[in-house]
Image (cartoon, grey):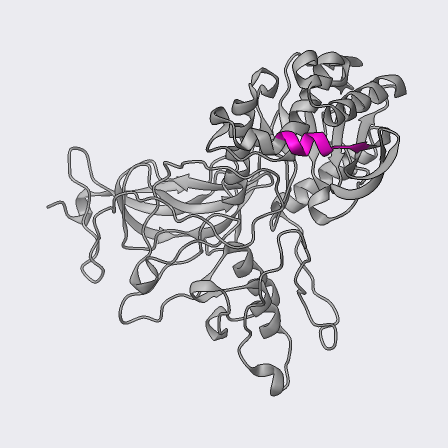
Amino acid sequence: MTTMTEASVREFKMPDVGEGLTEAEILKWYVQPGDTVTDGQVVCEVETAKAAVELPIPYDGVVRELHFPEGTTVDVGTSIIAVAVAGAGGAAPEAPAEQPAAAPAPAKEEPKPEGRQPVLVGYGVATSSTRRRPRKGPEAGVPAQAIQAELNGHGGTVDEKPRPLAKPPVRKLAKDLGVDLGAIIPSGPDGIITREDVHAAATPRTAEQAAPVTAAPAAPATAAVPAPVASYDTARETRIPVKGVRKATAQAMVGSAFTAPHVTEFVTVDVTRTLKLVEELKQDKEMQGLRINPLLLIAKALLVAIKRNPEINASWDEASQEIVVKHYVNLGIAAATPRGLIVPNIKDAHAKTLPQLAQALGELVTTAREGKTSPAAMQGGTVTITNVGVFGVDTGTPILNPGESAILAVGAIKLQPWVHKGKVKPRQVTTLALSFDHRLVDGELGSKVLADVAAILEQPKRLITWA
C-alpha cells in the first residue's frame, strides 16, 4: 500500500485542443475529489471557440482538487485539476478513507439519443471508443436524449440529494437566468429538465400556471415548428452571453461578409426524379444500413459540378495576392446546434463513392448530434452545403465560410404545379441558391456550377455520364 506521502501531485493544464486557441470553458466535470482516475479516462468536457471537446487525463491517480467550477472560462496552460499519482516505482495512491475509490468501470455503449434531433442533414450511425465514468446513484441507466453529448452531472451518494438531470446547454441557460435546477420539477423523459422548464421557472407565474409543466406532443416530422422559449407578459428581455462557438462564428461571419464580395444566384428545379432515385437506393443492397436522403444526392451533384468546373473550388490568398485552386474537396455540412452554427466537413469527399459518401455524412451528423465534433473536423473546408429547407423556407443567401469560395443553400422540397412534358402537373420542386466570392468566381463560372447541380437533380442519370 502506498501512502499519500509517497505520492506526488501532478497538475493537469488546459491544453490547446485546436490551433492557436487561447481559452476554453469548462462545461462539465466527470470526476470529483477522491475519485480514482486512469490514464486516458475523460475527466471533463470543455468548449472552445470551435467545438465541445472531452479531455482525457494522461496518468493514473486520485483526484485531489478541481481548480475551477463548471461554467468557468480558463486560459490555455492554466492548471484545472490536481491528481495525486504514485511515486517512482510505487502503486497508485489510495483514495481518502471518507470516500473510497471505486475501480474504473469498464466502458459501455452510450445510449442512443432520442427525441428531437439537431437541425442537421442526413442521419447515420457512428461508434465511439470514448470511456466515460459511469453515473453514480439511481440515474445510472437514464438514456441520453441529447443533441449535445450526454447528460451533465453526477448522482450523489445515498446520503446526498442526486444532482438534477439536465443537458449542458440547459445547465448553462439556468445559470444565465439565475434558476436553481434543484427546485425545478422536470417535464422531460426520464426526469430530464428541459429548456422550457428553466424558462418557466425564471418567469413569475400565477397559481393557475404553477402546476408542473408537461411535455407537449411531438409535432410531425415535417412541421419543424420551434417551441416557445419564453413568456412575453412578464419577462422583458433575456441576455445570453456570446462566447465559445457562437462568438467565433459571429466573428467569422462578420469578417467574411465584409471581406469577400458576395454574389448569390438562384435556380428553381424539379427534383421529382431525384426523390424517386432516393427511394430506389434505399432498396439497393450496397446501401443497406446507410441513411439515404436527398442531401446525399445533392452533395454528389455538387461534387460532380465541381469536377466539371474545378475553378470554383478555390480560395483567395490576400497576402500573396493569389487564387489557390484546390485539387481536393473537403465538403462542409452546416449544422445548427444549441451551441451555435458549426460546419464540420468530409475530408476528400471528391474521392468517395456514393456508399462511402453516405457513410461519411451519417458519421458527421451523428458526431455533431452528440456534441463530439472535433476542431480538426471543422478545419480545411473548401466548399459548403447548408440545408435551410429543414426550416420550411424556400431558400436563403448564405454567407461564405472564411477561406471558401462557394456555399450552396438548399431550400424546402415542395409539391408544386410545374410544366412537365407540355402539361401542368404536380411535381417535387426546390430552389437552390449559390453564394460565391466574386473576387475569384465570376458570373459565368458561378452560373455554370449552379446550372450543373440543377441539371443533375432534374435528371440524376447524369451522375453516371458526368461523374
Q: Where is residue 194 shown, x and y percent of the image?
A: 54, 64
Up-down: is 287 above or below 249?
above
Up-down: is 16 above or below 169?
above
Marks counted in the figure total: 0
Residue drawn where x is 66% and y is 65% of the image: 229
Q: Tell me where the magenta segment starts and ends, as one range.
A: 269-277
| Residue 411 vs residue 71, the one in the foreground | 411
User: In the current view of this chain or complex, which residue is farthest to the bottom?
Assistant: 207
User: In the current view of this chain or complex, which residue is farthest to the left?
Assistant: 1
Please state if 395 lies on the left or on the right of 273 as rendered: right
| Residue 232 vs residue 119, the one in the foreground | 119
Residue drawn where x is 74% and y is 41% of the image: 413
Can residue 374 be seen? no
| Residue 210 vs residue 91, the one in the foreground | 210
Q: Where is residue 394 shown, x and y percent of the image?
A: 80, 43
The answer to if 465 sits in the magenta stretch is no
Please state if 251 lies on the left or on the right of 104 as rendered: right
Q: Where is residue 415 shown, x and y percent of the image?
A: 77, 43
Magenta stretch, main secondary structure class: helix
| Residue 436 vs residue 72, the one in the foreground | 436
Can residue 193 be seen? yes
